[in-house]
Image (cartoon, grey):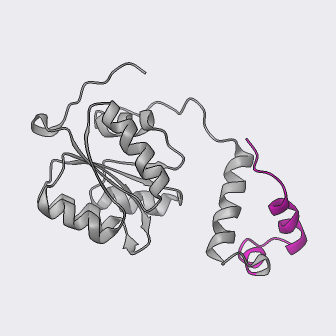
Amino acid sequence: MAELELCAPSGDASLLLVDDDEVFLRRLARAMEKRGFAVEIAESVAAGKTRVAAHPPAFAVIDLRLEDGNGLDVVEALRERRPDSRIVVLTGYGAIATAVAAVKIGATDYLSKPADADDVVRALLADGDALPEPPENPMSADRVRWEHIQRVYEQCDRNVSETARRLSMHRRTLQRILAKRSPR
């Protein structure tokens, strides 16, 4: 990807990353530093709010669901402290309702995981009127289905019967799906 010009509010390239997935957080932080951002990280809603209060960044990438609460609380805190900031809500729980809520609260954009650093940079620096480009390598429909099933399975504490009930699917069918490797 060609180097992008940082069109930060007031020339500030400060970026706050808030995510409770430590491996993802560190990897994204390194990638964003290579792209010219001054990165600060937080692994919880409380830590994110503390960073926003101390130094509201020009940019933020905030996970929707965190161990200690909802990432939208950090979005609200940042909007109050720095209305010109550009915020991307990044989550593995992609749904139209949460995307609408994130944008209404003040997020600039909304991306579903897995999103790479180039997708994040494009979302952070996008012109508000321009439509984003479609992803180069979108997930296949089978992969999206598999990810959704895995997410519901984890939310049900890995209880196959409860997961099958919530997905309106036969328990044995679910067991076969869970036994297979993830699709590409």
Please name the predominant secondary structure of the magenta segment in the image: helix
Instruction: Look at 71% across and 76% down and name the residue there.
Output: 166
In percent of width and height, residue 85 lies at 19, 48
In percent of width and height, residue 57 lies at 18, 50
In percent of width and height, residue 130 lies at 34, 31
In percent of width and height, residue 158 lies at 71, 75
* Left or right position of 145 against 127: right
Instruction: Look at 76% across and 78% down and name the residue there.
Output: 165
The answer to whether residue 58 is above or below residue 8 is: below
178 is within the stretch colored magenta: yes
Q: Is residue 129 at all visible to an observer of this figure?
A: no
* Left or right position of 21 against 80: right
Task: For the C terminus, give its image quadrant.
Answer: top right
Choose top left, top right, bottom left or bottom right for residue 139. top right
- Hey, which residue is sitting farthest left in the picture? 10
Task: For the N terminus, give its image quadrant.
Answer: top left
Q: Nearer the viewer, residue 93 or 168?
A: 93
- Hey, which residue is sitting farthest top in the picture? 2
The magenta region covers: 162-184
Instruction: Look at 67% across and 50% down and name the residue there.
Output: 144
Instruction: Look at 34% across and 38% down and name the residue there.
Output: 32
